[in-house]
Image (cartoon, helix red, strand yellow):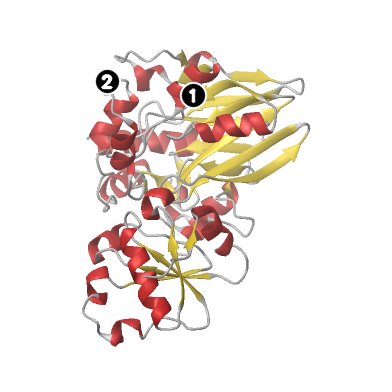
Amino acid sequence: MSKVQRITVEQLNEKMNDGKGVFILDVRNEEDYREWKIEGKQATSINVPYFHFLEEDENHFKDLPRDRDIVVVCAKGGSSEFIVDLLKERGYRGYSLQEAMLAWSQFYHPTAVAEENRMQLIQINRLSKGCLSYVIVSDGKAMIVDPNLNIDVYQEMSRQQSFSIEHVVDSHLHADHISGGPRLAQATGATYYISSSEAKGTDLAYEPLEHHREIRFGNVQVDVLAIPTPGHTPGSTSFLVNGNYLLSGDTIFVGGLGRPDLGGKAKEWAQDLYDTVFGKLNDLADDVLVLPAHYADIREMNERGIVGATLGDIRNDNEIMRTQNREVFTEYVAGAVTSEKPPNFEEIIAINRGELQVDPEKAIDLEIGPNRCAVHHHSN
């Protein structure tokens, strides 16, 4: 077997954004592919399970392009290398994704959202899960909002850009991924914030968000206003940065609203969500940029690679955001959840509450898969 060419997840992401696009051949089984795959606006993806290629049937190669690089993806890396070798024998240009979907699940990509008034706002996109976290920097000090499992990403950024992490915030108790918040705060000496209604009954060391109307840091006094926005969970909190950027957690997404059923109180939490949409957030201007903690569709990413939209656009595109009849809103939201609950969400919540400890390998296994915290996506 000849030497197989490999490509890293960083190189794959560059290919997906270089204007030429990328062709992905996923050789996992059909069920795994339907459940979770690599997606990008400039990515073409097909699924031909590995065992089909063992049949030595040339028909399995007929949909593969000869004039483009083909990135072969499997679960852990071994199968893709075998397939790349078969492709090379037939004159195709194939690359094996190094460490496969395991590596993709841990890839974090930063994009600058804003740089103004000596404040920098960066969105960290964990593309494999549609998870978004944020770094807000001002005068060498930083706040991290909704950090994900791999806290090295944020610490390495702080070293490279010479800022200290002083505040770490979780907008709510996450159900679909393991929060890096408590560990990041402990590692950096930062204060960890979360709503007490999310953390009550836990052993978490935290500062209650409801005690802080604003958190200021840096000479420019970047204001982060804590806005209780219950609905997805009772203690969900959003943050208004400098009056222009709403870090909305899982309350409002580019394509919809957070699902209210994960606590088993869909109608009750849907009513909380109504009060949030038409009370707490009603007075915010249409030009406020909403930056959520998740997304469920690659179309929610704009041409700059940022997942975000103005509040006015979200209101216009999403009929439920304009449904001011409480009863109609509640019935629609509570009844519209059709997707499965996040896999392993009970274990993940227990970890995020500090009640369950797992080793790093187990933590990665628990998280693998898409996010399922959003509902009510518009059809545009």
Camera-side residue: 302 or 43? 43
Q: Which label sits in the foreground, 1 or 2?
A: 1
At x 31% / y 49%, what residue is drawn? Answer: 332
Q: Is residue 336 visible?
A: yes
**Label 1: how many residues lie within 10 Å, few (<14), some (14-19) or many (20+)?**
many
Q: Position of residue 378 (x, y in %)?
A: 44, 59
Disc 1 element: helix
Residue at (66% x, 19% y) in the render: 216
**Looking at the image, which is closer to me, 328 or 351?**
351
In the image, taking residue 88 as reference, residue 114 lies left or right, namely right
**On-image quarter of the N terminus:** bottom left
Instruction: Name which residue type carries label 2.
Output: Glu
Foreground of the two, 113 or 151: 151
- Which of pointers 1 and 2 lies earlier in the amino acid sequence? 1
Q: Which residue is mark 1?
A: 184
Residue positioned 37% across, 64% down in the render: 81
Q: Residue 256, percent across and down?
A: 44, 50
CA–CA distance between discs 1 and 2? 17 Å
The circle on residue 348 is none
Left of 370 or right of it: where is 338? left
In the rendered image, residue 224, in percent from the top left (x then y), is placed at 61, 26
Q: As displayed, is residue 207 above or below residue 136?
A: above
Circles 1 and 2, Cβ within 8 Å, touching? The answer is: no
Quadrant in the picture for residue 247: top right
Residue ID at (74%, 39%)? 115
Residue at numbered disc 2: 355
> For the residue marked with disc 1, what is the amino acid?
Leu
Against 341, residue 303 (above or below) is: below
Vertical side of 61 occupied by 251: above or below:
above
Examine the rendering and report whether any part of residue 376 can be seen: no
In the figure, 12 relative to 239: above or below?
Answer: below
Q: At which x and y percent is residue 283?
A: 58, 36
